Image (cartoon, grey):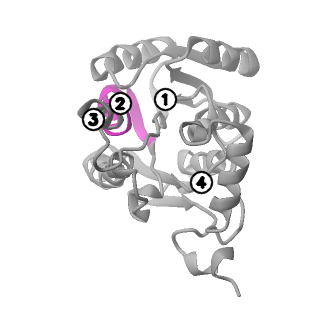
């Protein structure tokens, strides 16, 4: 098992990509701590994944709450080998119809919390630890109406590089996974029914060369690679999992003759 004896922390690990990654890490031998805002889904995750999973209730948008929880995780499980900074929320912020409160909520959750999660982990990270940040293709796609979300994910790309440089003397690697359209509950903010989601998926896949949404397990596999010794000489990089949407956009179905 590639993570035998390792300790991993995953923020937002109670659903979607975070939960898929927790499942994958445990299958590879790790002890995993996850955080999340929802006590019910945390309990469900604990029931599913068993004794190798520890759960901690945390709203990462409250930056002051992060360090005490990280300290408790280290106290409970020991020094940390892997951090997957995954927690985030989606939300539209169209020009002319966005309040400062909505904008700041996205920034606090998707950007500020990323910095302070990594900062809180520093005293507990082993030499050679791996930190993985969760980005988004929104950082480069320029999708109308998504300014705040895109800005936070663009900032995460910068954090990946700066943190990689700053933590290199400690032997700590920092990398990023960058999902495209992935089948998770993040779409609930724009598709409030199954019919709406089917219509949205049909529209989205027309712009993806591989003509499908990604799956959380596919992102989890990339996170596993970056967490493991298989990527031991990789830092300051991002793995894009978007079916070619950003790298080969002209191959999408919408452009085919």
Other residues around mark 1 within 10 Å, as few (<14) / some (14–19) / many (≥20): many
Residue under label 2, please give it: 117
- Is residue 257 among the parts visible in the rendering? yes
Q: Is residue 49 above or below residue 88?
A: above
User: Is residue 118 one of those drawn in magenta?
Assistant: yes
Using the numbered discs, state the Cα–Cα distance from disc 3 to disc 4 in whole angstroms.
Answer: 26 Å
> How far across and down, in percent of the image, does residue 4 sit?
65, 33
User: Is residue 92 one of those drawn in magenta?
Assistant: no
Q: Residue furthest bottom?
A: 257
Using the numbered discs, state the Cα–Cα distance from disc 3 to disc 2 in whole angstroms.
Answer: 26 Å
> How far across and down, in percent of the image, does residue 102 sit?
33, 33
Q: Nearer the viewer, mark 4 or mark 2?
A: 4
Other residues around mark 2 within 10 Å, as few (<14) / some (14–19) / many (≥20): many
Residue under label 4, please give it: 181
Other residues around mark 4 within 10 Å, as few (<14) / some (14–19) / many (≥20): many
Question: Mark 2 falls on what kind of element?
Answer: helix
Q: Between residues 244 and 190, which one lies in front from this camera angle?
A: 190
Other residues around mark 3 within 10 Å, as few (<14) / some (14–19) / many (≥20): few
Q: Is residue 226 above or below residue 28?
A: below
Q: Is residue 223 above or below residue 51?
A: below
Q: Nearer the viewer, mark 3 or mark 2?
A: 3
The region drawn magenta spans: 109-130
Question: Mark 1 falls on what kind of element?
Answer: loop
Q: Answer yes or no: do the residues labelled 1 and 2 have beta carbons within 8 Å?
A: yes
Question: Mark 4 falls on what kind of element?
Answer: loop
């Amino acid at each position: 098992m590639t993570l035998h004896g390792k300790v991993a922390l995953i923020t937002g690990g109670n659903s979607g990509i975070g939960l898929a990654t927790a499942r994958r890490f445990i299958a590879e031998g790790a002890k995993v701590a996850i955080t999340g805002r929802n006590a019910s889904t945390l309990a469900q995750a604990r029931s599913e994944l068993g004794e190798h999973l520890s759960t901690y209730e945390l709203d990462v948008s409250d930056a002051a709450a992060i360090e005490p929880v990280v300290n408790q995780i280290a106290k409970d499980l020991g020094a940390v080998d892997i951090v997957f900074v995954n927690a985030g929320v989606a939300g539209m912020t169209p020009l002319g119809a966005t309040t400062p409160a909505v904008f700041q909520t996205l920034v606090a959750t998707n950007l500020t919390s990323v910095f302070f999660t990594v900062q809180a982990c520093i005293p507990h990270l082993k030499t050679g630890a791996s930190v993985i940040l969760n980005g988004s293709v929104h950082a480069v796609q320029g999708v109308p109406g998504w300014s705040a979300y895109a800005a936070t994910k663009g900032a995460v790309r910068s954090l990946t590089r700066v943190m990689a440089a700053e933590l290199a003397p400690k032997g700590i690697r920092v990398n990023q996974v960058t999902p495209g359209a992935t089948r998770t509950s993040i779409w609930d903010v724009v598709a409030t029914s199954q019919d709406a989601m089917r219509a949205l998926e049909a529209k989205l896949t027309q712009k993806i060369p591989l003509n499908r949404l990604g799956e959380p397990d596919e992102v989890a596999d990339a996170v596993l690679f970056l967490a493991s010794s298989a990527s031991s000489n990789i830092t300051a990089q991002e793995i894009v999992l978007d079916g070619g949407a950003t790298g080969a956009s002209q191959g999408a179905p919408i452009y085919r003759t």
